[in-house]
Image (cartoon, rainbow, N blue to C red):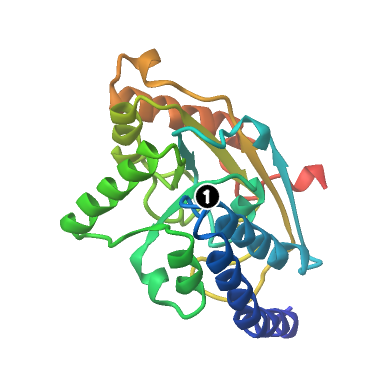
Amino acid sequence: MALFSILYWLFFMVSLPPLIVMQLAIFMVTAPFDRRRTWVHLFGCFQGMLYVWANPLWRVRVVGREKLPWNSAAVITANHLSILDILVLYGLFAPFKWVAKGELFRVPFVGWNMRLSDYVPIWRGDRVSVRTMMARCRAHLDRGVPVLIFPEGTRSQDGEMLPFKEGAFKLACEANCPVYPVAVSGTGDALPKHGILFRNSMRARVEVLDPLYPAQFGGDPSALREATRAAIQAALPNGKGILGAAAEG
């Protein structure tokens, strides 16, 4: 498994330069008419899924992607088990903007990809960064572009969902737009939180649940937050998602 992991990450690093060149070309061609950078982002979705398809140990099943809007504001929220969540969520192939930790934007090629797609950075523990993130998300929502947020704020250590932070739900209430809960399972055991060596095969499942509307909760972000968390919890195998959809094969 160690040798396979090394070969896989070598492929990852070697493939990044030509892919970023292709993404830059798409950006330059589409920039005059694609102000939302939808095509640049969709190529990023292909790129993310390419690394799933290229790994014979990994499978992902996406359910309910047709529920997601293409031209209207929405806040997409997903639980967070592993860095692999990012790859499998690209399988949604829907136009959205990630909210991601700022450190990723400094990583060569990866960060360039994120900047080209106009994703939103946030720096942990920095209140100014949080306000800036909220403002940029509001701007995306005002343009009818969904944003995707991990409301736990970080990856779970043991598969148990952490408490949800309220920012995503304040955004939804302010914009009066739906929240789409997304349950991710099967990624937590494939790659440890701190490490690059694969431990197990991955049988991941990404399920888009029915939307929740602020009006259903009287415009209360806290109530919307708890309902979203409960919906995701109920959709996860055994209420966790560590092993995920392994039984589905």
Up-down relation of residue 32 to residue 146 (above or below): below
The answer to whether 240 appears left or right of 99 in the picture is: right
| Residue occupying image coordinates x 78% and y 43% | 247
Closest to the observer: 211 or 223? Answer: 211
| Residue occupying image coordinates x 56% and y 29% | 234
The answer to whether 17 appears left or right of 145 in the picture is: right
Residue that numbered label 1 is attached to: 159
| Residue occupying image coordinates x 58% and y 65% | 29
Res 174 quadrant in image: top left
The answer to whether 200 appears left or right of 150 in the picture is: right
Is residue 96 visible to us here?
yes
Residue type highlighted by circle 1: Gly
Tell me where residue 85 appears, x and y as whole percent: 57, 55
Crowd rating for badge 1 (residues with CA inside 10 Å; few <14, some 14–19, many 20+): many
Please state the total of marks drawn on the protein image: 1
Tell me where residue 10 appears, x and y as whole percent: 67, 85
Up-down relation of residue 234 to residue 205 (above or below): above
Is residue 192 visible to us here?
no
Tell me where residue 148 appears, x and y as whole percent: 46, 46
The answer to whether 4 appears left or right of 238 in the picture is: right
Up-down relation of residue 57 to residue 215 (above or below): below
Closest to the observer: 200 or 54? Answer: 54
| Residue occupying image coordinates x 42% and y 70% | 104
**Which type of secondary structure does the marked residue at label 1 adopt?**
loop
Tell me where residue 240 appears, x and y as whole percent: 56, 42
